[in-house]
Image (tube, helix red, strand yellow):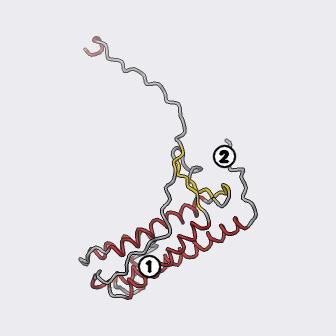
Amino acid sequence: MRIPLTTRLPPDDDVTREFKCAIGRLIYTFADIERVMFYSLITSAQMPIKIAKAVFTDAKIDKVKQHITRLRLARGLPDDAFLDDTFTQIGHITRLRNDIAHYGAVYESGAKFKVSDELWKLETARVYFVTACDIDDAISDLMIIRQRLALYMISGWVADGTTEDRPAPFPWRHKPFQPTRSPKSSRPKSPKQPRQRPSSRESQ
């Protein structure tokens, strides 16, 4: 079986080096956010770090968001648009980071690199294109997210649930990509066989 691999190699120039450096910065900054998110969870749970480590084992970002939301709900705290907006943006950037980390980014043209799961999908695949500037936008937002989480932990909002003194909404730089969908692979369908009714002799 022949595996379809791209034959378009990236040029060894400043564009490629800049893109690779941007990916490194994204992975590094994202790991820092994972650490800060876990601290936010510990603060929300209001328990010693050792106990939190035992309870919230291997808590990735998606799980941490769920835990914080459920803890606030259990304490009867009101909805927090500031926190929800932060978590939503973390979700968008998590998708970008995971796609690049797991599927890679293949050079396309100019400053664009193609991100797609088409090699792993039997039928419909997601395809979109990113540049180093797009990744830097996500990194910039992660820095704002870090500040927001720090403000959440030290402001007392965790305990009293107050929402009046939240900062004004910040216009995020990273916008979630709208991936195109590659067409489904055409597979021949087997013709349906007509159902045969039992004869009167068989039904007796």
Residue at 54%, 45% (x, y): give it: 182
Q: Nearer the viewer, residue 148 or 199?
A: 148
Please, what is the three-letter code of the amino acid marked with disc 2? Pro
Residue at 54%, 70% (x, y): give it: 137
- Which circle's residue, 2 or 1, is located before the other in the chain? 2
Left or right of 157, for residue 109: right
Looking at the image, residue 133 lies above or below residue 53: above
Q: Residues within 10 Å of mark 1 (few under 14, many from 20)?
A: many
Looking at the image, residue 10 lies above or below residue 55: above
Q: Name the spot of residue 6 as percent of width and height, x first.
A: 68, 50
Q: Residue 115 sits in which quadrant?
A: bottom right
Which quadrant does the N terminus fall into? top right
Residue holding disc 1: 38
Q: Secondary structure at mark 1?
A: helix
Residue holding disc 2: 4
Q: Which mark is residue 158?
A: none
Label 2, label 1: how far apart the Cα atoms are = 40 Å
Q: Residue 79 sits in which quadrant?
A: bottom left
Give the residue at the far top of this rendering: 201
Q: Residues within 10 Å of mark 2 (few under 14, many from 20)?
A: few
Which quadrant does the C terminus fall into? top left
Q: Name the spot of residue 5 as percent of width and height, x first.
A: 68, 49
How many numbered marks, from 0 up? 2
Q: Secondary structure at mark 2?
A: loop
Residue at 57%, 61% (x, y): give it: 102
Left or right of 165, for residue 60: right
Looking at the image, residue 3 lies above or below residue 24: above
